[in-house]
Image (cartoon, rainbow, N blue to C red):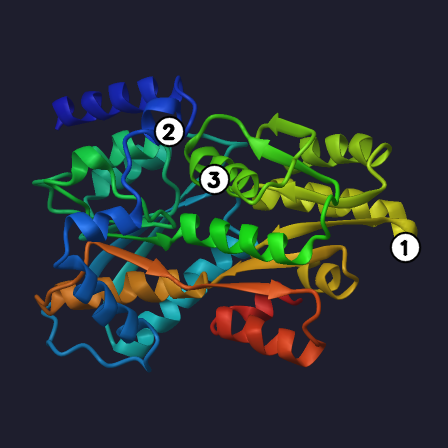
Amino acid sequence: MRRIFFYFFGVIFSALCVPAYGEDFSLSVIDGEDFYNRYPSQAPLAEQFSAIISSPPVPIRIVQSEPVRIAVLLFGRLDSIENRAMLRTFRQRMREVGIEYRLDTYVVDDQDDKITPYFEVQKAQPDYLIVTKMGFLQRRFIEGFLPSSHTKVIVYGFASPLLHWLDSPPLMYIGFNQHQATKTLASFLERNLSEGEAISALVLSDSYLGRERCDLFLDEMRRYGRSINPIFVLRDDKSKALKLARDLLKTQKSGFVFGCSQALSEGVLEAIQEEGVSSTVTTNAWNLSFNSIDYLQTKKAMVNVLFMKDALSVAATEAIKLDLEDRNLPSLYMARFMVVTSDLDSDSLQLVIEEAYPYSVDLWQR
C-alpha cells in the first residue's frame, strides 16, 4: 500500500507541473470515427447502446448480492449547475433501472486542495469510477487503475480514445463528436454569413480542444474560402475573453466573432450584450447557460451547438448496468448534438432544450 501511495503521489505531483491537454496529450488520441474504422466490431455495439440511451429505462436483469460502489470525480464547485445536473441525472437514471448502489463524490476545486481527492479515490477502491474531466493529470491518475485494478473507469465527457490505452482501455469513453459538431457549425456559417462578411475568432492555445475544435474550425472556414482576421489565441477563460472582445468590438462594428469554447463564447456574448441594441456583431454559443435562450432570441448568438449532456449521465448508468449483467458494451459512446439557430421560435426552442436536457432542464432555467 505504501508503494501505491508514493507512486500516485509521484504521478500526480509530476502531472501538476504539466498543463492539462499538453501537446503530447493532444497528439496521443484517436478520433472517434477513426476508432470505429479501426475496430469495426465497435460500431454495431455503439448503435445498440445508443438505442438503449434513447429508450425508456429497463430494470436491471440480475439480483445484486450487495450495492455497487461508485465514485464520481468532479471538478470546479460541487454546486455548479453542470455538476448538479450531472449528479441529478445519474441518480435518477440509477433509480429508474433499479441498481442498488452507494455513490461517493470527490471534488477537485481549483480554489482548494487539488491533490487530496485523487488519493481519497485511490484509497477507496470503488467498483466504478467516473472521471468528469480529461487532461494530463487525469490521464496519469486513471492509468493507475488500468488494466488490472478492481476499479472500472468511465471517462466522462471525452470521446477520443487514447492510443496507448487501446490494449487496456477503460470501461467506456462517453462524450461528443467534436469533429462533426465543428464541421456542422462551419457549414452553417458558410451558408448564412454574407459574402465578404467580417469574421474574427477567439481560439485556444495548443491543446486537445484547440486541436479538435479550434484548428478544425479555422481549417474548415479556410476551405470555404473565408478569411478570418484577426485571430486571437488565449486561455480558456471567460473574463479574458470578455476583456479581449470589448477591445475587439471597438474596431469591429459588424460581422461575426467566433468563440471556440463555452467560456470564450460567453465572454464574447457578454461583450456584445454590453454594446446594446446598436451592435450588429453576432457570435456562436456552446451548450446551455442561463442566458443562452435570450442570446438566441435577441440574435446576439446566431447559432448554438447544443450537446445533449444528460445523455452522458444516462450512458454512465447504462454502461454500469450492462457490465453488471455481463453483457457486451462498446468502448466508446458519442452522444448527439443539435445546432440551434436564432430563427427558431420560442416554443420550438423550449422543446429542443427539453429534449437535450430531459432530466435537468429546470436547473438551467431557474
Q: Earlier in the sequence, mark 3 or mark 2?
A: 2
Left or right of 217? Residue 302 is: right
Q: Is residue 260 above or below residue 69?
A: above
CB atoms of marks 3 and 2 within 8 Å: no
Q: Which residue is mark 3?
A: 216
Q: Looking at numbered disc 3 in the image, what kind of residue is underneath it? A: Leu
Q: Which residue is mark 2?
A: 115
Disc tally is: 3
The residues bearing labels 1 and 3 have C-alpha atoms spaced at a distance of: 32 Å
Left or right of 146? Residue 157 is: right
Q: Quadrant of residue 362?
A: bottom right
Numbered badge on residue 76: none
Q: Residues within 10 Å of mark 1 (few under 14, many from 20)?
A: few
Residue 165, how many percent across, how many down?
17, 37
Q: Looking at numbered disc 1 in the image, what kind of residue is underneath it? A: Val
Q: Secondary structure at mark 1?
A: helix
Q: Is residue 264 above or below residue 112?
A: below
Point 31% across, 64% down: residue: 315
Q: Looking at numbered disc 2 in the image, what kind of residue is underneath it? A: Ile
